[in-house]
Amino acid sequence: MPKLGKKLTDAIKQVDRNKLYEPAEALEMVKNIAPAKFDETVEAVVRLGVDPRHADQQVRGAVVLPHGTGKTRSVLVFAKGDKAREAEEAGADFVGAEDMVEKIQKEGWLSFDVAIATPDMMGMVGKLGRILGPRGLMPNPKTGTVSFEVAKAVQEVKAGKIEYRVDKAGIVHAPIGKVSFAVEKLMENLKVLMEQLIRVKPQAAKGQYVKGVSVCSTMGPGVKINSQKITA
């Protein structure tokens, strides 16, 4: 087992692993004990009472955080004609059609964070499934990245839209800001995320839905939160 650094060891000691902290208290602690010298991302980890092996218990979508994530995300839009111009005017970093598909296929180019496509482009973009899919870059109607409303889609990503998806263990990991954010902004982002997850609760999910919530920084330990106080 690798030896933990002194800063991380000290951070772990400050967290009571058996305590459910008030949300604001937990976020303040995450900010204060973040061990790295860079501006770490603050992440929410939500354990849900779903069985992701069943299609009717999948939890996946996107939500716009009111204060963004603190990261500028580059956007590629697959579109033609008026929709391509619309994407450019909305602030897309890269816009194209066959040329972009070929660039990705032949050059392995992946210098973007989010890909958006108009529905008529998906026949062409579908050829990139094996490249974009494993990296979470494939446009998807469920996350609003397949749409004729390209300007809106681009603007939402630039404004702080994040995608979330439950993993095989029934856990959602989602960024809610940076350590440099004020606690109030982190709190508002966390609240919006939790409200969205509750809103999309699968009908097939039985029993307790939100089983646990914790927050952590990129390099720091998790801090458990009393989830009932987040959306109260």
Image (cartoon, rainbow, N blue to C red):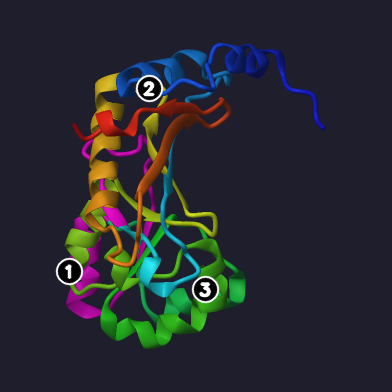
Say which quadrant the C terminus sits in: top left
Q: Residue at x 46, y 62 (%)?
A: 51
65 in magenta: yes
Please state if 16 lies on the left or on the right of 179 as rendered: right
Q: Nearer the viewer, mark 1 or mark 2?
A: 2
Q: Earlier in the sequence, mark 1 or mark 2?
A: 2
Disc 3 marks which residue? 103
Q: How far apart in space, not on screen, are marks 3 and 2 (Cα)?
A: 42 Å
**Label 3: how many residues lie within 10 Å, few (<14), some (14-19) or many (20+)?**
few
Q: Which amino acid is tagged 2?
A: Leu
Q: Which amino acid is tagged 3?
A: Lys
Please state if 59 lies on the left or on the right of 231 as rendered: right
**Residue 46 in which image quadrant:** top left
Q: Callout 1: helix, strand or loop?
A: loop
Disc 1 marks which residue? 149
Labelled pair 3, 2 in contact (Cβ < 8 Å): no
Please state if 43 lies on the left or on the right of 161 as rendered: right
